[in-house]
Amino acid sequence: MRIKIVGRWLNNKPLRCDACLELERLIQLSLGELGVKDILVEQCSSEEEYNSYGVMVTPILIINGVIKMSGKVPPKEMLKEFLKFELEKEGDR
C-alpha cells in the first residue's frame, strides 16, 4: 500500500501545516491499531508534484494513487476504514 500526504508548498519548500502533521499522526496510529507496521507514509516530494494534483485545499490524502480526501483531516475511524479497505483489496490482511 502506498500512502501519501500532500501539503502546501511555497518557493520550492514544503510547508508542514498542523493539519498535515495531524493526518500523519492519525495514519500512523491507525496503522498501528490495525497491526500494520511496514507501510511508509510518504510526503509530496516537490512543488512540481504538488502542482500536478491541482491542489486547492490541503491536506490531501492519497492511498494507492487515489485521492481519498482533501481539505480536512478525516476522523480516525474513517481513516481506519480507508486503510482496511485497501488492505483487504490487496490481500495483505
Image (cartoon, grey):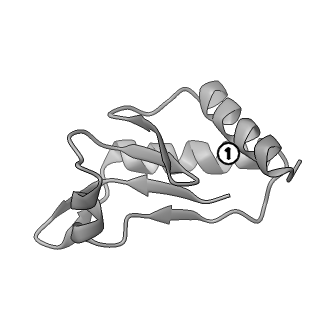
Q: Nearer the viewer, residue 71 or 66?
A: 66
Q: Residue 75: x and y, percent?
A: 55, 26
Going by the image, does 34 lie left or right of 19?
Answer: right
Q: What's the residue at 85%, 53% (across, down)?
A: 92
Identify the image quadrant of the N terminus.
bottom right
Q: What's the residue at 58%, 54% (across, down)?
A: 64
Going by the image, does 78 lie left or right of 11?
Answer: right
Q: What's the residue at 43%, 50% (across, down)?
A: 21
Q: Residue 88: x and y, percent?
A: 82, 42
Q: Residue 77: x and y, percent?
A: 66, 26
Q: Residue 48: x and y, percent?
A: 23, 69
Q: Nearer the viewer, residue 75 or 18?
A: 75
Going by the image, does 89 lie left or right of 77?
Answer: right
Is residue 12 positioned above or below 80 on the image? Answer: below
Q: Which residue is mark 1?
A: 29
Q: Judging from the image, what secondary structure is the residue with disc 1 in?
A: helix
Amino acid type shown at disc 1: Leu
> Badge 1, how many Cα within 10 Å: few under 14, some, many 20+?
some
